[in-house]
């Protein structure tokens, strides 16, 4: 049966040896020494393996139920949520003014990986609350912050985001949910929202919905959208709960995966709501939540790949099947373990190289968020804005692919629910869809982010890679990493030049290649991470008492990524340079 162990050793390697967080000049990072982060990760690993992971199969099997208008979560979820809340895990990086612990976002990210890998559906309840907290914290008035945030920090009240409607998915300008102003400054919210994760449940006293709606008389389209705080229960002036608001659950969606999370149809019938931010500027406030959510979904992608990989590896070591063609490795047994076979090794190496590279990429991104927020660094903010669609799109595409690869190691047992691998595949699949389907992420990257601030941030990204390659060009030990990274970066730049030259004449020249570009950029980002990790490991090997097995495995995995994965940039470039003609050749009626 499946198991999960938090990969704390690898996480510490990325945090301290690769990123050097405790020596960075980001406020709050000076306290993040190895002992401190190690203690947090160790405790997070315990609650993950002892509390959340045992509930993962329960949630998948039982799902959520709607009883008399109330959503009931699977058996044990409420008790587990209480333990998460009582342990302070929901408040790690929240503002101390509202009861939070004030740790940097990087620590929220590290813990988030562990909790998501152990039970993705469960972790979504508090993850979405964190996003709603962030939106109110950034855009709310002082009165709103004092009213809503303290109990959202503790998850006594949880939060959601309400965007999608039955007729309007990505095109939010088509939404019909309306907001009617009232004399007391509140609004009456009416409409229906679908696909609302954690829309209702029995684990918190109140649910605070952030709802996009249009104020009557506002501009058409997306420019007329505003954001509102709409609680499940109204809140009295003294903070106590008042009567039920005009919010109800229409149904719980039957889904392919994440069964333990309640995905609801939400009906708003003149529900009392309160404007968050400025009228008709709702997307600005919602993007605070959505950008955080997209990073979190990218994390979900590789976290599911991590737990699937752990179990596939264990199965490959234990399962006896066939003989090594170079000679028996288990001569006293009836067969050799699966892991001796080259194709199994290829499969496992693909998984290992992706998961560890993705982890470094996301942790690096989290430090950029901290630098942008805590040091008010506009360049860091611009760079993470550029990379957000890559983190979300590429990591979830590959995370799902690696979960299916892990399932493949099991052969027929991977297809049997009893062994648990099916759940990882099914749960990972949603990450490619929600918080902006990955095709939309690719369009955002190519259509908006490359040209943002005059292309300043993508040029800074290329300069970062160029500087790394120049710094290590005379290091013989780094030749196997610098050369492939440099070539992949050239491929990416060539694709960008193609878009500039052809896209002005025909926008489809850029848009038809956007998905390939997103994957190209993802490979280059992981290539940069692996080059940095290889250099770090090489330097560490020169120190007394080095953990040789761990460090040599890092270098070997880095070589694998450079040799077997990074060359994919040439394939993607070739596709892009064929132009839009073959993509757009058929009339819509010919499909």
Image (cartoon, rainbow, N blue to C red):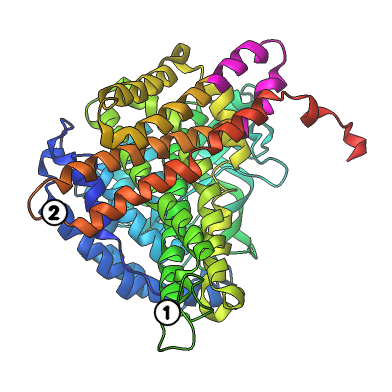
Compare residues 39 and 340 and report the one nearer the observer.
Answer: 340
Q: How crowded is mark 2: few (under 14 residues within 10 Å), some or many (20 or more)?
A: few
What is the x, y in percent for residue 219? 63, 21
- Where is residue 178? Give x, y as percent: 63, 37
Quadrant (top left/top right/bottom left/bottom right) for the N terminus: bottom left
Identify the secondary structure beneath mark 2. Answer: loop
Task: Count how many numbered circles sit on residues in the image.
Answer: 2
Instruction: Name the one closer to the observer, 551 or 277.
Output: 551
Q: Mark 1 points at which residue?
A: 318
Q: Earlier in the sequence, mark 1 or mark 2?
A: 1
Q: Quadrant of the C terminus?
A: top right
Q: How far apart are marks 1 and 2 (CA)?
A: 29 Å
Horizontal and vertical percent position of residue 165: 66, 45
- Residue 215 visible in rendering: no
In-image side of 213 versus 300 (left or right): right
Instruction: Say above or below: 91 vs 289.
Output: below
517 on left or right of 562: right
- Marks 1,2: beta carbons within 8 A: no
> Is 430 in front, or is 96?
430
270 inside magenta stretch: no
Magenta-highlighted residues = 494-516
Q: Is residue 116 above or below residue 542?
A: below
Q: Which residue occupies the extreme right position in the image?
A: 589
Q: Is residue 339 left or right of residue 404?
A: left
Residue plotted at (48% across, 18% down): 452
Mark 1 Cα within 10 Å, few/some/many (few <14, many 20+)?
Answer: few
- Residue, disc 2: 546
Residue extending furthest toward the left: 544
Q: Which of 1 and 537 is in front in this view?
A: 537
Residue 365 at x, y percent in the picture: 35, 37
Q: Could you tell me which residue is drawn at 46 percent across and 27 percent down? A: 487
Q: In this view, does 345 lie above or below 437?
A: below
């Amino acid at each position: 049966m499946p198991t999960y162990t938090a990969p704390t050793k690898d996480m510490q390697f990325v945090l301290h040896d690769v990123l050097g967080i405790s020596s960075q000049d980001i406020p709050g990072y000076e306290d993040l020494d190895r002992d401190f982060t190690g203690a947090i990760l160790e405790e997070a690993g315990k609650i993950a393996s002892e509390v959340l992971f045992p509930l993962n199969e329960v949630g998948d099997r039982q799902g959520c139920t709607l009883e008399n208008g109330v959503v009931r979560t699977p058996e044990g979820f409420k008790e587990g949520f209480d333990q998460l809340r009582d342990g302070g895990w929901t408040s790690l990086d929240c503002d101390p003014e509202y009861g939070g612990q004030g740790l940097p976002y990087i620590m929220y990210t590290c813990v988030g990986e562990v909790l998501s890998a152990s039970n993705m559906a469960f972790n979504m309840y508090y993850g979405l609350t964190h996003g709603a907290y962030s939106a109110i914290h950034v855009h709310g008035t002082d009165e709103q912050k004092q009213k809503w945030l303290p109990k959202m920090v503790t998850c006594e009240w949880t939060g959601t985001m309400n965007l999608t409607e039955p007729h309007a998915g990505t095109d939010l300008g088509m939404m019909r949910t309306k907001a009617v102003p009232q004399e007391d400054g509140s609004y009456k919210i009416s409409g229906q929202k679908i696909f609302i994760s954690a829309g209702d449940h029995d684990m918190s006293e109140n649910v605070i919905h952030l709802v996009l709606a249009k104020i009557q008389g506002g501009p058409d389209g997306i420019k007329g959208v505003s954001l509102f705080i709409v609680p499940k229960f109204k809140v009295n002036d003294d903070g106590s709960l008042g009567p039920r608001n005009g919010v109800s659950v229409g149904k719980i969606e039957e889904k392919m995966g994440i069964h333990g999370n309640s995905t609801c149809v939400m009906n708003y019938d003149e529900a009392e709501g309160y404007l968050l931010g400025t009228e008709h500027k709702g997307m600005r406030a919602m993007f605070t939540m959505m950008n955080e959510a997209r990073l979190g979904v990218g994390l979900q992608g590789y976290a599911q790949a991590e737990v699937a990989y752990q179990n596939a590896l264990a199965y490959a070591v234990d399962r006896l099947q066939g003989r090594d063609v170079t000679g028996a490795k288990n001569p006293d047994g009836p067969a050799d373990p699966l892991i001796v076979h080259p194709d199994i090794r290829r499969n496992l190496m693909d998984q290992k190289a992706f998961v560890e590279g993705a982890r470094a990429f996301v942790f690096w991104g989290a430090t950029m968020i901290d630098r942008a927020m805590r040091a008010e660094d506009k360049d860091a903010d611009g760079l993470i804005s550029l990379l957000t669609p890559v983190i979300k799109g590429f990591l979830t595409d590959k995370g799902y692919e690696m979960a299916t690869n892990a399932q493949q190691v099991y052969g027929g047992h991977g297809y049997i629910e009893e062994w648990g691998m099916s759940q990882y595949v099914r749960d990972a699949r949603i990450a490619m869809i929600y918080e902006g389907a990955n095709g939309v992420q690719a369009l955002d990257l190519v259509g908006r982010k490359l040209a943002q601030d005059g292309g300043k941030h993508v040029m800074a990204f290329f300069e970062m890679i160029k500087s790394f390659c120049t710094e290590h060009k005379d290091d013989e030990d780094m030749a196997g990493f610098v050369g492939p990274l440099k070539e992949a970066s050239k491929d990416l730049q060539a694709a960008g030049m193609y878009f500039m030259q052809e896209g002005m004449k025909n926008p489809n020249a850029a848009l038809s290649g956007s998905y390939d570009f997103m994957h190209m950029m993802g490979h280059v980002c992981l290539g940069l991470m692996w080059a940095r990790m290889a250099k770090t490991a090489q330097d560490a090997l020169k120190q007394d008492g080095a953990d040789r097995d761990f460090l040599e495995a890092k270098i070997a995995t880095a070589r694998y990524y450079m040799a077997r994965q990074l060359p994919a940039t040439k394939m993607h470039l070739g596709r892009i340079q064929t132009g839009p003609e073959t993509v757009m050749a058929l009339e819509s009626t010919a499909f």
